[in-house]
Image: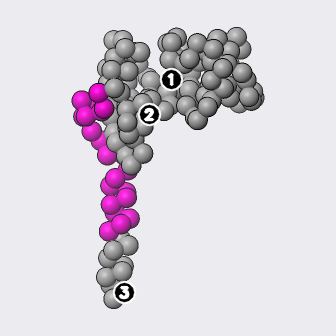
Amino acid sequence: MKKIIFTLVVSLFAFSAFAKDMPIQPNQLPANAQSFIASTFAGANIVAAQKDLDGFEAALNNGVKVKFELNGQWDSIESYSALPAGILPAPVEATANAQGGNIVKIDRDFGYFDVKLQNNIELKIDNNGKILKKELD
C-alpha cells in the first residue's frame, strides 16, 4: 500500500512539474493574445511562448514579456524600455505619465493596476486614475 501511495505522490509531483512552463508554438497562443501582441507591438515577433496551469507567456524579440490568462486577456507586461501608449485605460495612463517616467511594467489586478516607471516609482492606480499607493523601488 505504501508503494502505491508513494507512486501516486511521485506521479503527481512529476505531472505538476511537467504542467508548469510547457513550451508551445506562438500560434498556439489564444487568438486574442496573438492579436493583442500584433496590434500593440507592431513589428515585434514572438521568440518564445509557454503555457502553464495559470495561463500563457510570450517573449518578444524587442525584450517585452507578456503574461496572459487562460482566456487570452493580458495579465502583466514588462520591458526594459518604455511600453507603448494605449495599453492602459486613458485615466490610468494619464496618471502614470504625470509621475515623470516611462511605463516599463504593468500588472492588472481586480479594480486597479500596478505600474512601474523607468524612474523606479511604483504606483497602484485604480481604474479611474486615482493613485492608491506610491513608492520608490
Q: Indicate which label's residue lies in the foreground, 2 or 1.
A: 2
Q: Quick one: SS at disc 1?
A: loop
Q: Residue at x 56, y 31 (%)?
A: 107
Q: How is the protein colored in the picture?
A: one colour
In the displayed structure, would residue 55 be above or below residue 29? Answer: below
Tell me which amino acid carries mark 2.
Lys
**Which portion, as a residue range, is magenta?**
11-31
In the displayed structure, would residue 103 be above or below residue 51? Answer: above
Tell me which amino acid carries mark 1.
Ser
Q: Residues within 10 Å of mark 3 (few under 14, many from 20)?
A: few
Residue 42, image x, y percentages? 36, 12
Instruction: Kindly identify which residue carries mark 2.
Output: 67
Q: Give left or right: position of 47 versus 94.
A: left
Residue 99, image x, y percentages? 71, 14
Instruction: Kindly identify which residue carries mark 1.
Output: 79
Q: CA distance from mark 3 to mark 2?
A: 40 Å
